[in-house]
Amino acid sequence: MILNNTEMKQLAGFARQFGTFTGLTWIVSFLLGVYGIGNGLMQLAGVAVGLFSLYAITIYVKYLRTQVIEHPMNFSSIYGYVTLIFFYGSLLMAAAVWVYFAFFDHGQLLISFIDFISLPQNTKALADSGISAKKFIDVYSQAFAQYGPLDFAIEIMSTNIIIGIIFGIPVALWFKNR
């Protein structure tokens, strides 16, 4: 069913609201991942929080369709809603990543990663693969040094928007006209 003008405004408003919640979830996931390098439980929690955000988006779609619009929605309306949620969440996440790398990181992520790679079991795993740990660290450090805070933010934002464009298709197919 095609949405009228009032319903489209509601859709956009709820997309902003739920995009904010999604972005906050991603920020928590990002921080757990960054500060959890070398700590498997924190890394796992970061992944779980990130995956939960995908499930939460399907809940947001169901909420909009059943509680707000109160009638079946077509594919394009649901797809637009999901991609808007990802867009607004990506804006918030990109801002947080920029703030993190511009003001808080000061190379700490790189140092944590180098410490993690330098652990004996990781250097052995790299050596078993035919890769020198020192060379791996040097190449990674040089690549990391080329990135600034804005580069990280744009990378995260574009990646999340692309994921939203892809994720929106199965969600819209699942919820259309139900």
Image: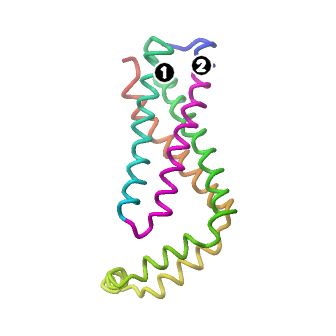
- Whole-percent x and y of residue 72? 43, 14
Residue type at mark 1 is: Leu
On the image, which quarter does residue 20 sit in?
Answer: top right
Q: x, y percentage for residue 14?
A: 57, 25
Q: Which residue appears at 39% of the width and 35% of the height? A: 170
Q: In the drawing, what numbered circle is on residue 169?
A: none
Which of 142/79 is in front? 142
Question: What secondary structure do most residues of the magenta stretch adopt?
Answer: helix
Horizontal side, residue 103 vs residue 177: left or right: right
What kind of element bears circle 1? helix
Seen from the viewer's position, the closer of residues 168 and 26 is 26
Mark closer to the chain start, 1 or 2: 2
Q: Position of residue 126 (x, y in %)?
A: 36, 82
Which of 146/48 is in front? 48
The residue under the point 51% across, 40% down is 165
* Mark 1 and mark 2 residues within 8 Å of each other at the beta carbon: yes
Q: Position of residue 74 (x, y in %)?
A: 46, 19
Instruction: Name the image colouring.
Output: rainbow
Q: Which residue is mark 2?
A: 10
Residue interval drawn in magenta: 11-39
Residue at which label 1 appears: 64
Q: Write down the quadrant of residue 42 in the picture.
A: bottom left
